[in-house]
Image (spheres, helix red, strand yellow):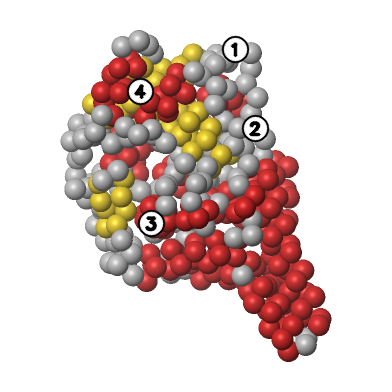
Amino acid sequence: MLALALLCLALALLPACLAAVNLGILRTPEPEAEEPGLVSILIPARNEAAVIEGTVRAALASAGIAIEVLVGDDHSTDDTAAIVRGIAAADPRLRLVTVPDLPEGWTGKNHTCSVLAREARGDRLLFLDADVTLAPNGAAGLAAHARRSGADLVSGVPRQTMGTLGERLTVPMIDFLLIGYLPMALMRLLPDPSLGAACGQMILMRAESYAASGGHGAIRTSLHDGVRLPRLFREQGLRTDLVAGHALATCRMYRDFRQSWAGFSKNAREGMATSRALPVWTLLLFGGHVLPWLLLVLALLVGDRPAAWVAAGAALVSLATRAAITLVVREPAATVPLHPATICTALAIQWNALLRPDRAGASVWKGRRYPLAPPGSPPHQGS
């Protein structure tokens, strides 16, 4: 039992060490007094009447750089278009773009983003999900970092707001996986596509680089632009980078556990839910963050004090890592004690998507459904 406890400690120390380095590397970019150039803020929207006004007004309130805001209305059946038209009547920087019918072989978000990019006039394109509220210095900060670093693509994770237990059991994994398991120093040093990462909620790209790479058209069947776009850029010799995004924008992705399960399931097959990757991720995550607690209880029950001490150390390291990440990215502190349950929930979503793709539900982007098909199947077709 002591050997297993030592393995758990090693698995807990891995993300602890990476997080310590990454939290020192990740910085909120500071904008210049007046950043040069024009940023096109591009917002794909389908039935977003509940949030689109706040998103658009926040984008229009951007300071420190010239901006235009384009909203792509993808056949909304609610008041999304009317709301945007009403705001645009008073601000010429805002344009509503009517998105054509979804072509065969495209997912809805990628098609809408591609249409918006063709209409944009800026030298930098900032893609925002419709539930992202941009801070006044968000666009200027991302553009300044891109210019100073020479990166063709810059992304950051907005501060995630959560109102229900279901959200708190799922959403914190975004920052935890990026900060705890991505070696960001290597990401900046090496051009390896496998080190590319972004958050699809907020991605800024040089317009020239976007066009040269093929942009969303090159990943048209994908449901996970946060993974596919940075890897696409790196495959073509372009630079990508991550910054601390919690002060640049906020986002509330989902409203309950059901939405969270469906939302994270849609990205699973293009993330860790593959037959090769998921066993490794299970060892890393379950072994480093759940098993220590189980071993601690078992060791106490059988009176194995050395194993109990080591397992307790592993459990504390795991919680301390999660607490440090949570504190820095300004997520609710109440999510920290839920960490082992959050890990179990994440693994359940991934294994469900891998082993039962026909019953794992469907990927949904605002009412358009895509089956969770196994690898090698035909591209998703939107309904």
The mark closer to the camera, 3 or 4, is 3
Tell me if residue 196 comes above or below residue 132 in the rendering.
below
Label at residue 347: none
Residue 140 spot, x, y in % from top left: 56, 21
Q: Are marks 1 and 4 in contact (CB under 8 Å)?
A: no
Tell me if residue 111 comes above or below residue 56 in the rendering.
below
Report the number of numbered marks.
4
| Residue receiving disc 2 | 28
In front of the other: 372 or 239: 372
Q: Earlier in the sequence, mark 3 or mark 1?
A: 1
Left or right: residue 247 compared with residue 18: left
Q: Residue at x 70, y 41 (%)?
A: 25
Left or right: residue 299 compared with residue 90: right
| Residue receiving disc 3 | 258
Q: Residues within 10 Å of mark 3 (few under 14, many from 20)?
A: few
Amino acid type at image mark 3: Arg
Amino acid type at image mark 1: Glu
Label at residue 34: 1
How much space separates mark 2 and mark 4, taking CA atoms?
25 Å
Amino acid type at image mark 2: Thr
Q: Residue at x 23, y 26 (%)?
A: 98
How much space separates mark 3 and mark 4, taking CA atoms?
31 Å
Residue 104 spot, x, y in % from top left: 19, 44
Q: Earlier in the sequence, mark 1 or mark 2?
A: 2
How much space separates mark 2 and mark 3, taking CA atoms?
32 Å
